[in-house]
Image (cartoon, helix red, strand yellow):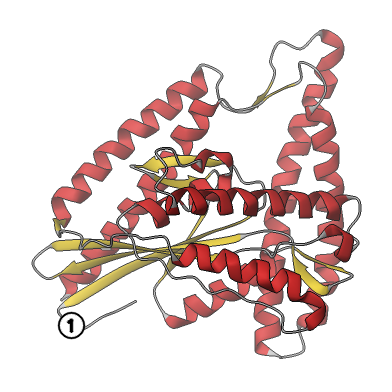
Amino acid sequence: LVGPAARRHAASASKTASQGASSSRKGGDEFGTVGETQWPIKSPTDIAKFARLVEAERVAHSHALNDRSSRSHCLIRVQCTHVERGGRSQKRTLLFVDLAGSERIAKSLAAGARQKEAASINQSLTALGRVVKELNERSAHVSYRDSALTMLLRSSFDGPSCTAVVVNVASEEAHAEETICSLRFGQGLSSVRTSAAVAAPTDVGAKRAQVAAELAAARTRLDELARTGQAAHVADDAPREGKAAMTTLRKNIAALGERKAEVRALKAQLAEARAAGDGAEQEVLARLVPARAAHDSLAGIVALQKTIKGLWVPASSAFQRCETQVIALATQLQMLSVGREEGDGG
């Protein structure tokens, strides 16, 4: 995003789309998802491409009420750094949230995995409604920790922010009960009061040095945690009969990473092919379907292997928090560096 000649902006967007994403503190009262993906944005073309990719990544399934029902909440965080000629900068964060709609399972007729997804979505929306109620009642304790969703939205409710809400409802009489429920939910949200504040500009050079030092320290901590066995890993002390399973799991995890990258790349190609309308969509789709099937099959195998007692050690919460901090600091440093390169060019 480029402003007038006297100003420069660096921007990046991050996304997550999950009804069960874990969250981790990034700084102050701001939380982010573990494994949050960062995308640099420098032009309107980048924005359009990112929007298409987000749509391609979202999971949707049909049920009795909707041909294409979102099975997850989608959060997109746009981080902007405004750098002036004098070397001063201001940071702004825009959080766009598309909530999956609440469903009455008796009407949607969801079953099996779809029913579990609906229950998870409804549970997070119930937690959000509870937070809104507590905020309006000025409760001493607000139960943000009841859901990953409310943790991620916390800075939009009790931080120095300005929040707007759009509620989509159906006009058909058959859905009057759900419409009234949604409108009441929106009415509750409209009563929450936030306090937007003007961010004081900071010195870019000093901020960049500070972030670089924090990043180096965080990477050192992360390396130390990995050395002490707190990163996710295949157990090294499995019995002799488990050695073959260890080797197989390592190979499958490596192969799963390759399949995941392949599917993600093909999804991006498919989104671009659909936008271009040049007839390449079917060709990409023909490659994506078997690639996705291979990925899903291998993911199931790896998930089962990880349940074997003593074979897999998950990452500790301390490692996950530190890893999230490293990613956030690296992104912040990159944005400050982009701002410097463009701002110095004047």
* Residue situated in front as seen by the camera: 284 or 160: 160
Q: Is residue 245 above or below residue 20?
A: above
Q: What kind of residue is marked 1?
A: Ala
Q: Quadrant of residue 5?
A: bottom left
**Residue drawn at (18%, 62%) of the image:** 89
Please state, as top left, top right, bottom left or bottom right, where the C terminus lies in the image: bottom left
| Residue picked out by circle 1 | 5
Image coordinates of residue 226 in percent, x first then y, are 51, 24
Relative to the observer, which residue lies in front, 50 or 238? 50
Dividing the picture into quadrants, the one containing residue 1 is bottom left
Check disc 1 and report its element: helix, strand or loop.
loop
- Tally of numbered tags: 1
**Is residue 306 positioned above or below 153 on the image?**
above
Left/right placement of residue 134 relative to residue 174 reads left
Residue 54 locus on image (x, y percent): 61, 68
| 144 to the left or right of 70 | left
Residue at the location (20% across, 60% down)?
199
Determine whether, in the image, residue 108 is placed left or right of residue 156: right
Disc 1 crowd, CA 10 A, few/some/many (<14, 14-19, 20+): few
Residue 4 position, x and y percent, is 21, 83
Q: Position of residue 223 (x, y in %)?
A: 44, 27
Q: Is residue 186 above or below residue 173?
A: above
Which residue, as the protein is rendered here, is positioned at the far bottom?
278
